[in-house]
Amino acid sequence: MSVDHDERPPAAPSGHEAASASPDGAMSGAQWIRLAVVVGLLAWLTVATGVYGLAMVLGIMVMIFLHELGHFVMAKRAGMKVTEFFLGFGPRIWSVQRGETEYGLKLIPAGAYVKIIGMHDIEEVDAADEARTYRQKPFWQRFGVAVAGSTVHFGLALILIYVLLVGFGVRGGSLTDPDLTTWRVAGVANGTAADDAGLREGDDIVAIDGRAVATFDDLREVVRARPTEEVTLTVERAGRRRSVDTTLGRRTVDGEVEGYLGTGETLPVQRQNALEGVPGAFEEMGRVLGLTVKGLGSFFTPGGISDFGGQVINAGDEPVEQPEQGSGAGQEEETGENRLLSLLGLFRIGVGLGSTNGAVALITLFAFINAFIGIFNLLPMLPFDGGHVVIAIYEKIQEKRKGLSRRYFADVAKLLPMTYAVVAVLAVIFVSSLYLDILKPLEVN
């Protein structure tokens, strides 16, 4: 999605566009039709995908709006001239002129932009407005405008994480590093060893044949190695321990026989109080950002790109048949894929998570989305905001090094070939991700 401030040089509006930017915000017949189309699509979306589909679309739109609002507020505070603030792309639905800024909505709700004049040295600006351009402002004001969008995303992620920790609680006490030793029994399958032993959801299997099983993986390891054997489970329920005997099942996975108990795991929900949630949210935020950086670093490597390319090439192939699985120890763990999601894929994931796990899952998803966009948008190259940050820092260093009393302007023209290359790569990733999400969508569990 495009959430960066627009860098196009200002152009004289056409007669149709100029007429749409009325002081009182009056709309033409064509604009009313566009608005009806958008409202109709949102209504259809709600009917087709439920409330969580609508929540995903509105959530993404609000997130994009707040990103651009960050740029807008910082630019206004710095005295820069902002000529446009639009939510969406394409044909106008509605716009209104307030002072020097035109505010409005456009047909395609897949992005937004703020038009700040004079973003770099090659943009032509009226001489009367030169003092109010981005490029003429002091370093800290330019830096503040450039990082404002990502700062908003980090703030949103932090708030959402705090709401999760304090308002709802999270399984295992952490979004990123849950305490696996707190696991409990979930989903006992009928006719299995777990069912014969009388296990219930919420039970705590403490040991098997006297061997402590602190985590579900510990239990899985013991069970897999003992197909058809009789075992004694030490189970804790409502604070009381008891021992039960059962005979493990067996099944064949990838040509190997392994034991099977027939139960899954769940982690209890843990909530923090309002004071604990403050440092807790910052700790979680740090881990989320670390995982985001690690994930991006893994993707943008020769191996990561090669893996992604292989997924795209093989997306149309028939899926490999998996062995039959049920809930229970001994079940193969699912593996993730090294890929980025398109808006379509993100939408599907959100609807699926919301439908199966409720609003908490959706809040968690948006916390991770905001952290990702905040980091991704700071990549140190144009057209990302991080590119403007690097240019501002470079210009400041040059001013100090040369002892200049005036503004030093980086030659952005020299960066254009790289910028075009970055845009081309982003376009390929966008199309490839969309292709993958259509032919091979990720499953939601």
Image (tube, rainbow, N blue to C red):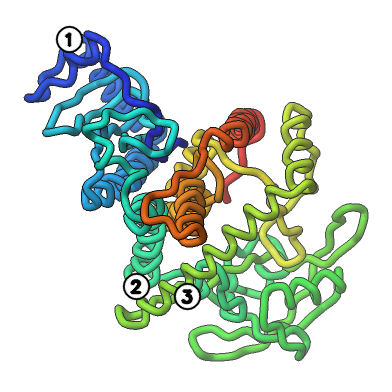
- Asked whether the residues under the numbered discs 3 and 1 touch, taking CB atoms below 8 Å apart as contact, a structural biologist would say no
Q: Earlier in the sequence, mark 1 or mark 2?
A: 1
**Disc 1, SS:** helix
Furthest-left residue in view? Answer: 24
> Mark 1 Cα within 10 Å, few/some/many (few <14, many 20+)?
few
Looking at the rendering, which quadrant does residue 364 occupy? bottom left
Residue 93: x and y in percent read 24, 21
Q: As displayed, is residue 407 above or below residue 311?
A: below
> What crowding class fits label 2: few (fewer than 14 Cα within 10 Å), some (14-19), or many (20 or more)?
many
Q: Residue at x 75, y 71 (%)?
A: 220
Q: Secondary structure at mark 3?
A: helix
325 lies above or below 87: below
Residue occupied by mark 3 = 283
The total of numbered circles placed on residues is 3
Residue 102: where, in percent of width, then height?
20, 30
Which of marks 1 and 3 precedes in the sequence?
1
Mark 1 or mark 2, whichever is nearer to me: 1
Per the model, the C-alpha gap separating discs 3 and 1 is 52 Å
Say what amino acid the circle numbered 1 marks. Answer: Gly
Relative to 254, 197 lies left or right: left
The front one of 401 and 111 is: 401
- Which amino acid type is marked by label 3? Glu
Q: Which residue is mark 2?
A: 166
Residue 310 position, x and y percent, is: 78, 36
Q: Which mark is residue 29?
A: 1
Residue plotted at (67% across, 55% down): 297
Q: Give the residue type that dot 2 points to.
A: Val
